[in-house]
Image (cartoon, rainbow, N blue to C red):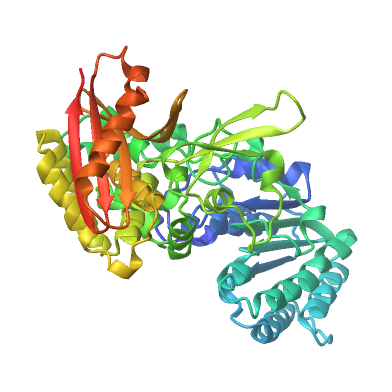
Amino acid sequence: MKPLPIGIQAFAELRKGGYLYVDKTKDIHRMISTGKPYFLSRPRRFGKSLLVSTLEEIFKGNKALFEGLYIYDKIDWEQRHPVIKIDWSKIKHVLPQEMEVDMSDFLSRLAATYQLSLSRDFASGKFDELIIQLHQKTGQQVVILIDEYDMPILDALKKPDIIDDIRSFLQSFYKIIKANDEHLRFVFLTGVSKFSKVSIFSGLDDITMDAAFAAICGYTQEELVAAFAEHITDFARSENVTENDIIESIRWWYNGFSWDGKTMVYNPFSTLLLFRKQRFADYWFASGTPTFLIDLLHERNDVKLLLESTQIQTSGFDSFDPATIETKLLMFQTGYLTVKSIARSRFSEEWTYTLGIPNEEVRKSLMTYLVAAYAVFPVSETVPMRDRMLGHLFDGHVMAFERAMQEMFARIPYQLHIPREAYYHSMLLLWLSLLGFDVMGEVPTDKGRIDAVWTWEERVVIAEIKYAPEGDSEPLLKDALAQIRERRYHERYAGSDRRIALLAIAFAGKEIACRMEEIK
């Protein structure tokens, strides 16, 4: 078996070391043959840096690295171009002044490798000077590759006192690209988000949602089965199951990222670690826990985005200001929501994108961290408590389930309780989803909205939540059950084969009580 390229982002190292490589050069050839300035957004750890490194080796004419790959006999390898590759993870950018100095030093060092000297004072001026001098000296147009163009902005999102200065620097720096079009053969920028006010997107072809490049990063199902065949066989043998069983488990856990609603891909990072460790786990999520996203979801109480699909129009993907970004767009940009389907609007030229959670890895991980955020206890304790509550429900021990809920809410410091029914509603929906149930929140009927509906073995459970800042839980339980019956919420499910259960949950101050009744 070929070794797995975990942590390897340099194409030359990958090829010289004989590591497994899923050939993406057909997509790359299409891109470099049909256009010039491109932008591609993908979440972290999705192979963007390896893609940039591959482009660098192509334009430098390193043909030997591509033997056996699609592009090997498709281009003129004698056409070598000078390359300016900027990787923001290697440029200091904590402060605007630091960016200016370190970028200036980087450009001067790069110029020296071509026996050039830069005389301008600022980074933007040196960038302009380097492009022109490289073209003049080599007689070949320049290639510009910028990896993680938005890293300085993302790292400054919680620093309002400097973010405008950071963006101002990038604006003056990136506008040099458009001004030097005649000197450029190819331009490629990657990033996570599409920020406004950085003066680059008007001149770039954004291929983020382009179906032709939907699989340029990540592995398709066909690529996974073909390229990892030996690893799949080895994994299946270690688990004492069939190869088809392993493939289906991998698909359920990790497949599902999409930018065109049709082409589904796997995250390379999770895939490689899965085959290395031969254990299903949240590798991609755990590699960089998005605390800012968890905090935002908690602050905005947007848990419905994790339970139900949501929609966004084409214009919603345009560049945005981080101060006003919608939660669902931020979750899409960072990979926690993905495109499930696309449909044209009946009334305009707009397209409607339906977004949802990509796969089980993302769903379970987000739920676990959000429950921990709501209940304010360690993630390490969330899973054992979840398993106990699941056992109570499947064994039909409603009172034990009630005690587990009381234990969970008892851990929340009193001053952190939010005195609103919506807070407890969100908490319950998160738990039920984490337990593995098919949960729908705020289900509309002709007589009102059901707080939650979920399936449990052969039952449909219709839940109503009541809250009061203080007092006795008993009246709240009675009111909840009475509301379900009076508004006949259960009639919507009367034709199913499942038995119907009514669940009342009452939060009276710090007191929690449950009551379940069957009507069928």
Name the image quarter holding residue 504: top left
Q: Count of labels shown?
A: 0
In this view of the protein, which residue sits in the foreground, 296 or 218? Answer: 296
Name the image quarter holding residue 410: bottom left
Q: Quadrant of the C terminus?
A: top left
| Residue 230 visible at all | no
Indicate the position of residue 407 as horizontal and vertical percent values: 17, 57
Q: Residue furthest top?
A: 495
Indicate the position of residue 120 as horizontal and vertical percent values: 84, 85
Residue at the (69%, 32%) spot, across then down: 351
Name the image quarter holding residue 168: bottom right
Quick check: 1 above or below 482?
below
Left or right of 225, for residue 345: right
Indicate the position of residue 192 as horizontal and vertical percent values: 59, 57
In this view of the protein, which residue sits in the foreground, 85 or 192? Answer: 192
Left or right of 511, for residue 168: right
Left or right of 330, for residue 163: right
| Residue 120 visible at all | yes
Residue at the (46%, 56%) spot, across then down: 297
Left or right of 118, for residue 311: left
Residue at the (16%, 51%) spot, across then down: 404
Residue at the (78%, 50%) spot, across then down: 36
Indicate the position of residue 56 as horizontal and vertical percent values: 65, 59
Quick check: 422 above or below 91?
above
